[in-house]
Amino acid sequence: MKLNKTNYLKLLALSFILFISTGFLKSDNDIYLEINKAIEIYGKVYKEVTLNYVDPIDPHEFMLAGIRGMLQSLDPYTNFIDEYQQKDIDMITTGKYGGIGATIGLRDDKITIVDLIEGYSAQRQGLRIGDIITKINDEPVSKENYQDISELLKGDVGTTVSITVQREGVPNELNFNLVREEVEVKNLTYYGFVPENSNNAYLKLSGFTRTAGDEVRKALIDLKSKKEIKSLILDLRGNPGGLLDAAIDVAEKFLRKGQLVVSVKGRDSLSERRFYSNQEPILPNAKMVVLVDDGTASASEIVAGALQDHDRAVILGIPSFGKGLVQTIVPLSYNTSLKITNGKYFTPSGRSIQKIDYTAGNKVILVKDNSLQEKFFTDNNRYVFSHGGIVPDTIVQSISEAKPIQKLLAEGMFFKFATMYYNKSPELDLKKISSEKLFNDFMNYLSEQKFKYTSQQADLISNLKKLAMQDNYPSEIIEQINSLQNLIQQYDNNELKNYKNDIIAECKEELAGRINGRIGRIIESLNYDKQFDAALSLLKNEQRYNTLLSVK
């Protein structure tokens, strides 16, 4: 039988389709064969070691070690979530948990209350920031069981928890019996007109749980009911992100309906999902600045990237964290889950802002990310770059980079000073304390604590002296080193006075947090915030604002 040209082409096309199909089938069969082999080998190793290792082994912990070791070969966001961590996942997704409304942390290796949420039992019943927790339900706690403490404090709504604390200035331990309540974590920790008599709105967004968009919506409506909003500063600094849906919901409050917010691509390049703004913006025309820093990550970067690419806002601050990966929660057996990276997101201009390449040098991941930093363009044809976080349109540092201030922060001296100061005078009125007195009180406190600032130069001279003595250098050289060492120490002793304003600002912020909680801390911090001041100045300078956004 002879084939005409048409039949020949049909047969060739069919053969090509069969070839491709069998190729895919073969590939699928291969991977499932490899999976089954791996499961069999892993199961045999696990069983053999668990039963026959020289010392008895905890089967559950051994299994967890194997899973975590396996996931560590991927990215840091792909994690196994055991039954004890499920409450944390519920809190991220719902923004609620059963607890007392306190945040704990390690200070000098002691379990310390570092923050309180206004209105909940911990704050209402008299716990204070700086209190050191020694017992929970009469069980001693320390840095050794620090990882378990959050679980001890959280629990079902209505149940009670007993907490014993040490408080500076109080000789005996204090005991508190607290009722766990449904704590709702607010994403929008503060909003208002700043300065108070201006038409500039300020929103401090600290997270992206399910309610983030609704909180922003209510805040904008509330502010608009008071007076016209002519400009807005959206503060995303230190915001670690959260839910993708929440990021889209927040972005919709500022973008025009129909504008692309973000696109997500999975393992299969054909599975791209594109998310558009489906709402009319609440604030369509007001000038806008978004504050970002190296703690701005994930969902925060989605919002900042969308506003930047559509030239809706000027991004101000320092480059963001650079997390361009998307995770999903997969439920497993026995109340466990798997949080797995299953996509990469791209801003409206098409760029990935993922900073760290986890495929580099990784034998487990077969496909490598070979893309370099590329140039993309915003709606107004401004160029932006990929693979480095969200790079601000204007770079402004905020926190003092001075080494003495960084040393004081690292040693927790401002936190300790505020704890002591407030416990001595709980009725403290920050407005009535002069900055000069506060500075002198802080310096006296450092002296009492025997805190000495030692510069890098002093450390180098000290090491030089040790080496010179070890090598038996002549005494006249040792004397010269001693003389230089004394001069540097004298300089270091006076160095803190050169940063008086920074020290006063840090002290006032800590004390404001003790007096008026989170809101007090935020409001006080804005008085000394270089990035916030730069944002205000930019919003007042229409020509520069338009130039940065290439508005004609």
Image (cartoon, rainbow, N blue to C red):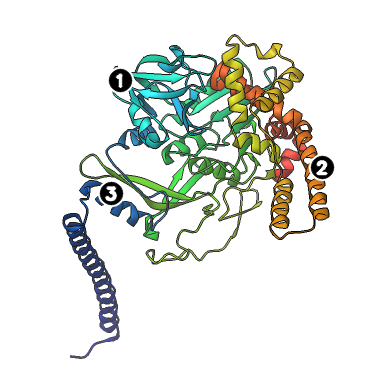
Q: In which quarter of the image is the N terminus?
A: bottom left
Give the distance between the C-alpha atoms of the residues marked 3 and 1, in whole angstroms: 30 Å
**Residue at mark 2:** 487
* Residue type, mark 2 in image: Leu
Query: Viewed as shown, does residue 295 lie left or right of 358?
Result: right
Q: Quadrant of residue 164?
A: top left
**Residue nearest the observer in this picture, 345 or 162:** 162
- Of callouts 2 and 3, which one flags the residue occurring earlier in the amino acid sequence? 3
Seen as rendered, the residue at the extreme bottom is 2
The image shows a total of numbered marks equal to: 3
Give the distance between the C-alpha atoms of the residues marked 2 and 3, in whole angstroms: 56 Å
- Which marked residue is nearer to the observer: mark 1 or mark 2? 2
* Residue type, mark 1 in image: Val
**Label 1 close to label 2 by CB (< 8 Å):** no
Q: Quadrant of residue 551?
A: top right
Crowding near the residue tagged with mark 3, few <14, some 14–19, many ≥20 C-alpha atoms within 10 Å = some
**Residue at mark 1:** 157
Q: In which quarter of the image is the C terminus?
A: top right
